[in-house]
Amino acid sequence: MGGKWANTAEIIGALNLPQRDTAVNYVVDSIIELIRGKKLQPGDRLPAEPELCSLLNVSRGSMREAMRILSVYGLVEVKRGDGTYVSNSEDSISWDPLFLKFMLIAPSETEMIELRNALERVLLTIAIQHATQEDIEDIRMAHYAMKIAVGKRESSFDELAKMDIDFHLTVSKATHNRMLNSIYCCIMNYFYPYVHKSLQVLENYGNQAVKTHEAALSAIETRDYEACEKAGGYIVNVWESLVFTRDNDE
């Protein structure tokens, strides 16, 4: 047990969001808006599921799916037999205002693809310009960690997803551009659930991801701007074909 109960009256008073396309999205948006407005604080215990369903006028199925999504993003913690709590990790990326804004916007597939397409090429170009030998070694280590894990087929989907994201964040760190790194970190963490689910349903996702990592690493190692342009496009094309084709096929 732990954490104070969230104030039900404040929740009712704070919720004036229009219902979006689905009940699940409405619940996710509502909880995020309450967090942003400080009506829900880290460690707060949410009302029991039946009460929350009544407050938001949604079914239990929609509520559970919304809580699963919020849990994956690290915003809430579901404790079986106890309740659901607002995450206490206020220093995590999930509490970044930009990250919360992404969650509320719920960008379309096209918007995400266009954004990443623009960022990957810029990121690799700046990494080529500023990466130190220590940075390049860190990128190599991140690459080989996932390559070995994919080959052994012993790691969990969660571990592989984190390795995939970690590789890209290591490249981002090599830019030595704090603003770009902060934005990219938010974006990649927003994409985490997409990567995680793709690893679960696509047997070749891990191998394809490793190949894109190899292309990026090679471009940085050789300081090859033409290879960098190709690697950026390759990363986005593979990511788009695997992640979003899988979503459309479901």
Image (spheres, rainbow, N blue to C red):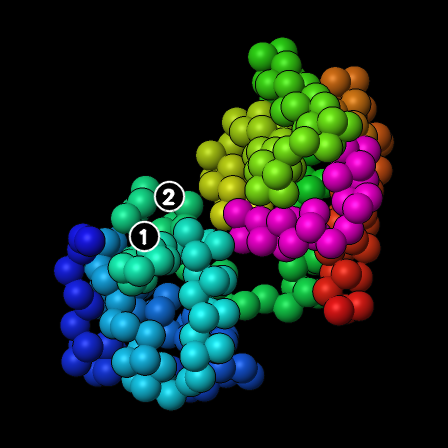
Q: Residue 39's quadrant in the figure?
A: bottom left
Instruction: Give the residue at x 69% y 42%.
Output: 120
x, y percentage for residue 146?
68, 29
- What's the magenta bit mostly, secondary-structure-wise? helix
Q: Which mark is residue 98?
A: none
- What SS does tag 1 mark? loop
Q: Is residue 168 above or below residue 61?
A: above
Q: Residue furthest front?
A: 81
Q: Which three-letter amino acid code belongs to the residue tagged 1?
A: Ser
Q: Do the numbered discs 2 and 1 sit on residues whose CB atoms are within 8 Å?
A: yes
Which of pointers 2 and 1 lies earlier in the amino acid sequence?
A: 1
Q: Quadrant of the C terminus?
A: bottom right
Crowding at dot 1, Cα within 10 Å, few <14 / some 14-19 / many 20+, comes out as many
131 vs 167, nearest the viewer: 167
Instruction: Give the residue at x 47% y 54%.
Output: 73
Which residue position holds label 1? 87
Q: Is residue 179 above or below residue 136?
A: below
Residue 103 belongs to the span the image colors magenta = no
Write down the region rendered in magenta: 189-211
Which residue position holds label 2? 92
Q: CA distance from mark 2 to mark 1?
A: 9 Å
- Residue 43 shows in the view: yes
Compared across the picture, whether 67 is left or right of 113 comes to left
x, y percentage for residue 13?
21, 83
Q: Which three-letter amino acid code belongs to the residue tagged 2?
A: Ser
Compared across the picture, whether 1 is left or right of 206 comes to left
The residue mark sitting in front, 2 or 1, is 1
Q: Is residue 172 above or below residue 67?
A: above
Compared across the picture, whether 126 is left or right of 1 comes to right
Compared across the picture, whether 19 is left or right of 11 comes to right
